[in-house]
Image (cartoon, grey):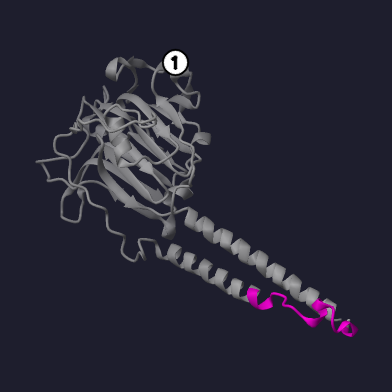
Amino acid sequence: MFRFIKSKKTNIACILRAAAAATGILYACCLWAFAAPAGYVNRRLWLANEPDGQSPYVMYYINGTKQPSGTINWVDGRNSGKAIYLSGHGEYLDVDYTQLQIHTMTIAGWFYWKGAADGMDEESMYSQRLFTLAHSKDTWLSVMPHTRKTDVKGENGGILDGVYMAFSMGKGNEKVFYEFFNPAEEGKIHYGLPLNEWHHVALTMDGQWLRLYIDGQLWFERLLVLGVEEMRNNYLLIGGGIWNEPTFNGLVDDLAIYSFAMNKEQIKMLYLDTDPLEEGATLPSTSAPSLPSPPETTTRAPEKGDILCMPPWLFYLAIGLLAVFVILSVLLNALKPGSTKDDSGEGGENQ
């Protein structure tokens, strides 16, 4: 009888031990989402480079219809190379979703924006996209070279008139939506990407922060715990979006996806035509920006109601998981079989 009772307690302890381990793993996974995984292999996938080096994972579309990759319009680009020309009439590039299922990412390349496409009204230029990342029509991130809306204002009253980035996740009461722009003075100044000039644009995501750089300088950043990780993007559209708006009119050159989030020094290297993946790569001494007067950028403040820069539901989930882990650990320790006379060979008559 004694042996049966001891075995039952041991089974309970094993169950609790397994539950505690599972909770610990779940909690660790939650924390893992806050930071890029260690030892991630650096990988680069060219999206718009030379025709001979073009990746088979990049597809070419016109008005939603896939075209042969051999029909991509390659023209003279930067530094005596080749660039892809998108006419603004429904043309865009799409990246195979299997290349997007990564935890951290950098998208970086050069854009030569021509504004409104031939035959289209001037206002259409303010709806064009540099690129759009999307999981669905509810969860997406899009970057635009210049959006102008006088009814959208910043905290200090300045209007939306310049480079614009938006992030959306979920729908209904669970929807999260963030806008990024540098408020401009109406009629006197704007922060849009200049026309008919080459400019370098880079987006980095590390599981915690979204950051957008233009010509090697930080323009927007935001702490976005879990948001990008949960997206697990199914689409990366270069020059287009998912809402049938006007597509990009201009050239795209040396555009690539990297499987890690670059730091600001590496982004500056890309802007200065230095490959940060080369062994021993260093930042060149010259670092004059192409844009003469970029706006000053500051870290955006957490949203009202955030706790430790986290949405309340995420904060309480982490606390709850930690509490369950502690409780299970205490119970496991209390039920852990101890040393008895039976274990030492004495009191055998009780068996």
The answer to whether residue 92 is seen in the rendering is yes
Give residue 174's quadrant in the image.
bottom left
Q: Position of residue 31 (x, y in %)?
A: 48, 57
Is residue 234 toward the left or the right of residue 305 in the image?
Answer: right
Is 262 on the left or on the right of 33, as rendered? left
- x and y percentages locating residue 61 in the rendered image: 44, 25
Position of the C terminus by quadrant: bottom right
Q: Quadrant of the N terminus?
A: bottom right
* Depth check, front residue: 56 or 3: 3
Which amino acid, by three-letter code, is at mark 1?
Answer: Asp
Q: Residue at x 34, y 39 (%)?
A: 203
Q: Which residues are magenta?
A: 333-350
In-image side of 24 versus 214 (left or right):
right
Q: Is residue 317 above or below residue 66?
A: below
Residue 340 on the magenta segment: yes
Residue 108 picture quarter: top left
Query: In the picture shown, does residue 135 fall above or below 91?
Result: below
Q: Please give the name of the residue rendered at 26% of the width and 22% of the height, measured from the top-left corner.
A: 118
Toward the viewer: 239 or 348?
Answer: 348
Is residue 87 rendered to the left or right of residue 329?
left
Q: Secondary structure at mark 1?
A: helix
Residue at which label 1 appears: 52
